[in-house]
Image (tube, rainbow, N blue to C red):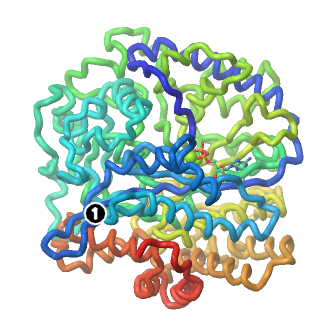
Amino acid sequence: MGLLSLGTPLHWNQSKKHAEHVRNNGISQLLISHEISKNRDNDKFYWGDEIEYIMVNISDENNDEKSLKLSIDHDYVLDNLSEDGKNYQKSLDNEVLFHPEYGRFMLEATPLNPYDGTSISDYFKVEDNMHRRRKLAIEEIENPNVYPLTLTTYPLMGVKDFCSPSAEVNGSASKSLFLPDEIINKHVRFPTLTANIRRRRGQKVAINIPLFKDINTRSMDAIDESIPVRDLFPYSDNEPFLNSKNPAAKPGHIYMDSMGFGMGSSCLQVTMQAKNMNEARYLFDSLINIAPLMLAITAAAPVFRGHLADQDVRWNVISGAVDDRTPFERNEEPLLNHPLYGGHENNSENVKVNMKRIPKSRYESISQYLGGNEFFKSSYNDLNAPINEEVFNRLKSNGFDNELSKHFAHLFIRDPLVLFSERIEQDNNESMDHFENIQSTNWQTLRFKVPSQDSKPNSNKPGWRVELRPMEISLTDFENAAYSVFSILLSRAILHFRLNNYLNISLVDENMIRAHHRDAINKDLFYIRTNINDNNDEIIKELSLNDIFNGSNEFKGLIPIVKEYVEIEFKDISKIQQNKLNSYLELISGRASGKILTTATFFRSFINNHKDYQKDSIVPESVAYDFCKFAKKLSEYDSDSVNEFFGPKIGQFLIENKYDSIFRN
Ligand code: ADP
Ligand code: MG
Ligand code: MG
Ligand code: MG
């Protein structure tokens, strides 16, 4: 988790005056920490995962009173289990840590200590640790109907009266027509972040996700009549329809107007430590094109705001949900009668001169390789990634090479979004807050994590790390462990075989688009470099996920690469460990080949086959209820559910290796 400073957060109008100060001092902090840790070497390959949960209230299965709500009054769970909380000791005893997240209905949990990626036994601690996190959360929740699901998006988010307890939709932080501010984490940072994104942008965020067209779906040309008409915030409330030529709410789309639709979704992340900075740069670059593949294979989000979408993942929803760019920066016309030029006075020519067009939201796929190795060519960086020239020059004149300077100079085109008045002045020798303020609000598919100033060479403070961030959260700990372990073993294999995974980065963006598509597993091809063992000109092929993961004549396959690495590196693997690893790889292989449905495809067919679904692309509460009930049973490894979801082979494995007794029955 990034910053959670306590204090008085500044309104955007105040905070923007300090933007340059934050950037300048943030770069000073980066320079100081870089100077201290640039020569760190031989750090251990530590790694850890992060799991996010959504607390749902699934009422008892009494047919008359079946109800499903998003639970927003159990945030004490986090207080109790986090540092200084009354049950923190329980977290420590279970070797887990709980962290705050954007939603008041969300929990995030990680292992207490990272794992050692060079020790085979550590790979088999992760699933057990995930079980303990879920179990601890379940025990801490007082209401037996409330359950922490690892659901990527809450399907009824923003659908009338979806919270428990009920909350009125009238919040001034988001000004949303759908989401009450009560869903936002109470810590003042989060409502401020929500409001300041809106203020900087000059209007509410506007997310439009293509609607899935079923036989009874409303006209794709008409305005969505489920958008409430309200007259509470005079300007904002009219936004969806304000500009008839270019309305904020696009016909044929699912319109969403608030940060919670994106930042309220859950994902799986893994962070790993490289032995030194150069290795971290190489690993970062090697994973850039792995990110869209992992997004596609973990696809788990076919429903937004109670509507079936014509896409399967959350990514672009979050991207839109935190898009603080002004209309000018986005290269779009402002909405009619727009009073501000995106948080800046419209009439100032000066503003226009100093403003840049910015092709991407703060939440997006990586736009530049870090380079610094024998395989990198500058021509691979073929995207327009604007940079902060001043930051670039300063870093270059302080010993950063071209690509590293560009990386940070690109992140530093953004303004800080939340600033606490008590934290404006900082000791740059001690604090990384100004740096992190910009760094950790650039939410990209990968993050290049920088050591702090106290991270002297070979101290036990974290070193140079790479975080892989695209994956959707899966319904079971088994799947989340499988994807975590696979990502780490693949990273280890890349380092071990020193693979060359470079291709033009614009192709990675194209892969990100395809990863969103409905049923991308069966319907899409992805760009991949097939000659990963040499430094010749790249051979680029468009292959299916099946060919990429399982291998084909043209490409060895990511799973075979992992298997070969494990054979070479972990000769001491036990039979039980090998069986477990096989079950993980079996899952990923099955998903890639389409034999095991992705969560998104499964959810879609669950809806389609439900008696209450009217084939109109609208997901009734009863359907969402039954799905959440199913998801709960699945996460407890109920026999019928695992067989239905995974098929008999993995189903049987899970039933035989079930973690008995840890769940409340
Ligand atoms: P953030 O939200 O900023 O990504 P978190 O603290 O939530 O950070 O998660 C960081 C992850 O990194 C955790 O899984 C943690 O176990 C892991 N981790 C901690 N220290 C190291 C380290 N030195 N090297 C690699 N991973 C680490
Ligand atoms: Mg975290
Ligand atoms: Mg998180
Ligand atoms: Mg993280």
Who's the residue at 18% across and 51% down the image? 161
Residue 211 is left or right of residue 373, and the answer is left
Label 1: how many residues lie within 10 Å, few (<14), some (14-19) or many (20+)?
many
Helix, strand or loop at mark 1: strand
Residue 412 is left or right of residue 190, and the answer is right
Who's the residue at 76% across and 85% down the image? 575
The answer to which quarter of the image holds residue 429 is top right
Observer-nearest of 129 and 36: 129
The answer to which quarter of the image holds residue 482 is bottom right
Considering only vertical position in the picture, is 406 above or below 508?
above
Observer-nearest of 175 and 333: 175
Residue 269, can we see it?
A: no
Residue type highlighted by circle 1: Leu
Which quadrant would the C terminus be assigned to in this image?
A: bottom left
Residue 442, can we see it?
A: yes
Q: Position of residue 640 (x, y in %)?
A: 41, 87
Q: Position of residue 91 (x, y in %)?
A: 58, 54
The answer to which quarter of the image holds residue 557 is bottom right
Q: Position of residue 656 (x, y in %)?
A: 57, 88
Who's the residue at 43% across and 43% down the image? 102
Who's the residue at 63% across and 72% down the image? 549
**Mark 1 beta carbon near ligand 3 (under 8 Å):** no
Q: Position of residue 308 (x, y in %)?
A: 28, 63
- The residue under label 1 is 308
Which quadrant would the N terminus be assigned to in this image?
A: top right
Observer-nearest of 241 and 463: 463
Residue 276 is left or right of residue 359, and the answer is right
Q: How many marks?
A: 1
Residue 587 is left or right of residue 524, and the answer is right
